[in-house]
């Protein structure tokens, strides 16, 4: 009788283990939110080194974009709006989990230079006067680089975290 209980226990364990593997492996292969490699792949694709531009202007707003606020889930995280004489640009900086605060880095009213690749603004942003979006690779203030966010290929600095 003891052998039967052990066998039943072993069969139950194998079933639970197989179910757990299916629960984690299948969704991850499909790009589940917790799958870092899929997220990173989408973020790197959004950054196009062929569209590299630099913008200089005044920071008019620093904010966090939450998943419910954007159709583009890659743009969730810290943002700032930079405005100059001709453009009002929404700048995507970093994911929330990488930087808890922007305090001490940039502030509203700072004059900054931002380099990165541009994309067309979302319709909601255009209604707010945003000219285009920028996936930042670096931010400089007072002639010094204060944030280095990507390498020359667009690989985010947070990709190793």
Image (cartoon, rainbow, N blue to C red):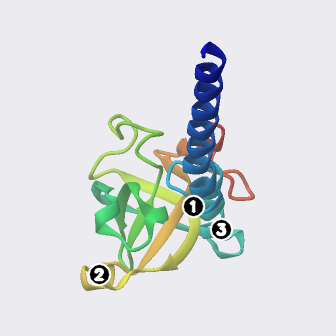
Q: Residue at x 66, y 71 (%)?
A: 48
Label disc, if present, on residue 45 of the rendered structure: 3
Q: Which residue is situated farthest in the top direction here? A: 2
Mark 2 or mark 3: whose residue is earlier in sequence: 3
| Placement of 106 over or under 74, stated as above or below | above
**CB atoms of marks 2 and 1 within 8 Å:** no
User: On the rendered image, what quadrant is the C terminus found in?
Assistant: top right
Residue 81 lies, in percent from the top left, at: 34, 63
Question: Of the numbered discs in the image, which one, if any, rests on residue 115?
Answer: 1
Classify mark 2: helix, strand or loop. helix
Examine the image and state in which quarter residue 157 appears.
top right
Q: Where residue 5 sits: x, y (%)?
A: 58, 21
Crowding at label 1, few (<14), some or many (≥20) Cα neighbours within 10 Å? Answer: many
Nearer the observer: mark 1 or 3; the answer is 3
Place of residue 86 in the rendered image (x, y in percent of width and height, measured from the top left):
38, 80
Say which residue label 2 marks: 124
**Residue 37 to residue 53: above or below:** above
Instruction: State the CA–CA distance, disc 2 to disc 3.
Output: 22 Å
Residue at screen point 55% across, 74% down: 118
């Amino acid at each position: 009788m003891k052998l039967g209980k052990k066998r039943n226990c072993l069969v139950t364990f194998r079933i639970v283990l197989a179910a757990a593997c299916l629960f984690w492996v299948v969704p991850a292969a499909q790009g589940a939110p917790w799958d870092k490699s899929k997220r990173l792949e989408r973020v790197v694709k959004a950054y196009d080194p062929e569209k590299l531009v630099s913008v200089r202007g005044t920071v008019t707003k620093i904010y966090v974009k939450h998943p419910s606020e954007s159709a583009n889930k890659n743009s969730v995280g810290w943002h700032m709006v930079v405005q100059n004489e001709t453009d009002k640009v929404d700048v995507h900086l970093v994911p929330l989990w990488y930087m808890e605060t922007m305090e001490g880095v940039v502030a509203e009213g700072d004059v900054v230079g931002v380099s990165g690749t541009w994309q067309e603004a979302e319709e909601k942003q255009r209604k707010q006067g945003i000219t285009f979006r920028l996936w930042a690779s670096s931010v400089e203030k007072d002639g010094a680089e204060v944030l280095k966010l990507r390498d020359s290929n667009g690989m985010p600095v947070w990709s190793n975290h």
